[in-house]
Amino acid sequence: MMPISSVESGRAHQAASSIALETASPFAEQACLVAEELDAAVQRFSQFLQFRTVSSPLVPHHTVEPDEFRRLHEWMPTAFPEVWETLEVEEVGDGNLSYLLKWTGTAEVKQQRRQQHRQQQQQQQPVLTEEEEELDAAGQPLLPVLFLSHLDVVPVANETLANWTHPPFSGAVAGGYVWGRGALDDKVGVAGLLEAATLLIRTGWRPLRTLYFAFGQDEEVGGGMGAAQIAALLASRGVKVDMVFDEGGSIGADGYPPYSTRPVALVGLAEKGYATILVQVSAAGGHSSIPPLDGSSAAAVAARIVTAINRRPPPARLVAPVTQFLSAIAPSTPGLRGQLFSVAASPLAPDWLRDLVAGAFLGRDTPETAALIRDTAAVTGLTLGFADNVLPPSATVRVNFRLLPGSTVQDVIDYLTEVAGPDLPHVRFEMNGSQNGSQATPVTPASSPYFAQLKAAVQQVYLLKDGSGSVDVAPTLMAGGTDSKHYLRISAGGALRHVPVSLNKTAGDVRRVHGLNERVSVADFGRGVCVFQRLLQLVGGGGSRSA
Ligand SMILES: [Zn+2]
């Protein structure tokens, strides 16, 4: 892959001073920001991290401190004045705490003008020539594309406060990193997009295709007050988008342990489904001084069910997009695993081989790889008993499932039925509260031109320092959920989920997400901005000409 431009790559040297302390990174420095631009962007990011935008499902607007959000909304236009002047900015969502930004494409402006012209001319001339109409490959007018991120962050556990190297809402810039809750998840997405747009506006660039940015206020608690409302607003306006880009897979600086050591960027093509089932156990109860001899107490039944779930998790299955993940990482995975991965990923692979790779390798290697090949079952609650001397008449085991593409809630009920075995007469299964469960999202095709554009943007920026080319890019399945699910009904092409910053799994970086000492390196922040800048250019088309 070529650098963005040979002229710009010389600027990277000027930026070197501010990143000198980053721990060994395999990546070359970014080349789209000069040192002063990177410093200014880092200062803005530091300020952004200082707003305590913690979300919670239990409070109005899903916002623990609404005043912090309001202060953030006062700060935003001052931090990104070019964006606020150039794009249409709306405060949306519950309490108007989320954002919807529209960067009208030059193609849309022309279309509107043509329509006005047609209306004026209708009486005299029946048809106008369709000169210069911007169309996509299928001959349709260009649909907008939507970029998502979120303003909210998860809380910081009080008992861990003392263990943060820098306080979680300090936005400290130290040791080559920007520290704070949201540095990775996902204020880096908001800041990255706004910095990238700012850079492009300064060069006079305008998109051909209309671009939307939507930043929700409560992604971490489901997006009901932010993303869901923004999606409904866009739908009510008849907006249909061609693709949604959202947070998701990051870049493995140390590859994909324990398989590949070659740096790889993961792009989520689908999200797993979600269902929480309560296993309600009934028992005879009675006096604790005379416990039953046959293991029929509520505690014994509940314990057997928990043990069975741990011993016999739901069956392993190899399905898309995990097959695509395997075929992407197979070439850099040494030994037998690499060979088996590449054969198992082929559509012609025999079932026994797929089952072997899923069950014997992915299913056992790490919790992350195991989550790729099965409906995961996690016991997240266990309730029984109310007094020292009473045998409980009931127990509840709460089991949270994440469903593979193709799995249904009935599949997990069938699994629990088997798990209960001889205890089945004493249990019944209930969906948790008002939740109906959700199936996995459809799988966005890796053949989408937007996947190719995202891959190109990532590979043009994340060049390997050792001269061996660029980071690999691999499709994957997201184990957790993102805001993008709310927008799928208005997206013709589905969603692609990626956050262009790197994590080093071996060094324990993954635990920083939602955990202690969340931080992003200054160098990665710069690279992230450059990936977004390149992606906006590739997706938006267009150039510096005016409409
Ligand atoms: Zn997030």
Image: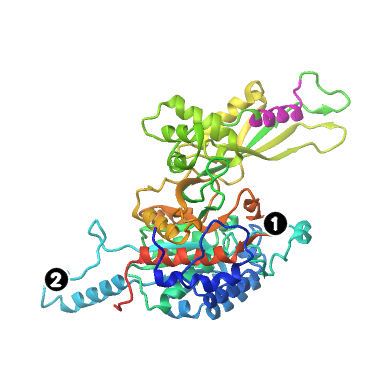
Look at the magenta stretch and give its main secondary structure: helix
- The reply to whether discs 1 and 2 touch (Cβ–Cβ < 8 Å) is no
Camera-nearest residue between 48 and 224 = 48
Q: Which residue is mark 2?
A: 129
Q: Residue at x 36, y 63 (%)?
A: 538
Please indicate, yes or no, whether residue 315 appears anywhere in the rendered image: no
For residue 326, which numbered disc appears in the image?
Answer: none
The quarter of the displayed image where residue 122 is located:
bottom left
Mark 1 CB near ligand 1 (8 Å cut): no
Q: Earlier in the sequence, mark 1 or mark 2?
A: 2
Specify the farthest residue to the front.
466
Q: Quadrant of the N terminus?
A: bottom left
Q: Position of residue 447 (x, y in %)?
A: 35, 48
Q: CA distance from mark 1 to mark 2?
A: 61 Å
* Front-lying residue, 155 or 461: 461
Q: Amino acid at mark 2?
A: Thr
Q: Amino acid at mark 1?
A: Leu
Question: Measured from the top left, where is residue 105 in percent x and y?
Answer: 34, 71
Disc 1 versus disc 2: nearer the observer: 1
**With respect to residue 486, does 419 lie above or below?**
above
Residue span colored magenta: 295-310
| Residue visible at 40% across and 29% down in the picture | 349
Q: Is residue 232 magenta?
A: no
Q: Residue at x 76, y 57 (%)?
A: 160
**Badge 2, how many Cα within 10 Å: few under 14, some, many 20+?**
few
Asked if residue 111 is positioned above or below residue 85 in the image, the reply reads: above
Give how far across and how far down residue 52 sits, in percent. 66, 68
Quadrant location, ligand no. 1 = bottom right
Q: Position of residue 150 (x, y in %)?
A: 54, 63
Q: Which residue is mark 1?
A: 516
